[in-house]
Image (tube, rainbow, N blue to C red):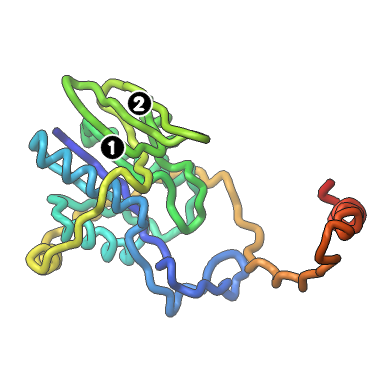
Amino acid sequence: MNIVVCVNHVPDTETKVRVGPDGVSIDRPGVNFMLNPYDEFAVEEGLRLKDKFGGEVTVMSLGGDTHKETLRKALAMGVGKAVLLKDDATRDSFAVAKGLAEELKTMGADVILFGKQSIDYDDAQVGTLVAELLGLPSVAVIVKLEIKDGKAMCEREIEGGHEVVETKLPAVFLAQKGLNEPRYPSLKGIMSAKTKPIAEKPASGAEVRVETRAMAKPGAKGSGKIVGTDKEAVSELIRLLREEAKVI
C-alpha cells in the first residue's frame, strides 16, 4: 500500500505569539515550531496501515527549510521517506492545496492522510481541497478507519454523534483526535532521522486567492458587571442584554 501523509509546521501551542512588524504575519523570531498536533494522528495512522498491509509511508510538507524539522519528527516516528515542496512565499489554503495536489498526482497514493486542520490558521480546508483537485473522495474528522478489499469504512464525528461511511480507494482522510494514540519517537528513530535524506522539490506555482490585510491580537476583555444576586436581578439583566449588549 502506498500511503502519503501531508503535514504542516506550526507554532507550538505554548508559544506566546506576537504580531510581526508588517502587521499581517506573526513575529517568527523566538517562536518554537512543531508538527501540527492533528497531523500526528495522521502520521500514526499511516504507520499502522503500513504495519498491517505493508508498503511505504511518505510524509510531505510545503514550505521553507524550517519545515524539515517537522519532517524529521515524522521520520523519527518511523516514516520511510520525506518530501519537502519548497516555497518561502506566503500561501493561502487553496495555493497550499494546489501545490500538494500537483505533487500527489505523480505519487500514485492509495491512501492520503491529513490532520483535520492546522492549528495556525484553523481553516480546515487544505485536505478537502486536495481531494477535490485530485477528483478523489474524502472523509473528514475520522476517529476510526478500517480498510478491506479496496474499500475504507470510516467512523467520523458529526454534531451530536458519530457517522459511519464507506468509500473506495484511493481516497483522502482527515484525522481527528481519538483516531489513535501517536507513538513517541524512539532514541534509535531520532538518531536515524538525522541522517535520512529529505527530497527537495520546488513547489508548483498557484494563484493566491486570499490576502491577509491585517492581523491583531484579541482586545482585552472588559470588566464584568454584577446586576444582582437574586431573582430580582433578572429583569435588569434582560434589559442590559437587550439595550447594551444587543444580543437579544
Identify the residue shown where x is 30% and y is 36%. Answer: 144
For the N terminus, the image quarter is top left
Looking at the image, is 142 positioned above or below residue 29? above
Residue farthest bottom in this picture: 30
Who's the residue at 41% across and 44% down the image?
116
Q: Nearer the viewer, residue 159 or 21?
A: 159
Say what secondary structure mark 2 lies in. Answer: loop
Amino acid carrying mark 1 in the image: Ile
Residue sitting at x 13%, y 50%: 80
Reading the image, the residue beneath label 2 is: 136
Image location (x, y in percent) of residue 211 = 60, 52
Residue at the spot 77% in from the left edge and 73% down from the top edge = 223
Say which mark, if any, is on residue 20: none
Q: What residue is disc 1 on? A: 112
Q: Amino acid at mark 2?
A: Leu
Q: Is residue 69 left or right of residue 221?
A: left
Q: Is residue 74 visible?
A: yes
Q: How many marks?
A: 2
N-terminal-most mark, 1 or 2: 1
Query: Where does residue 171 sit, x and y in percent of width and height?
Result: 30, 29
Residue 183 % position (x, y): 20, 56
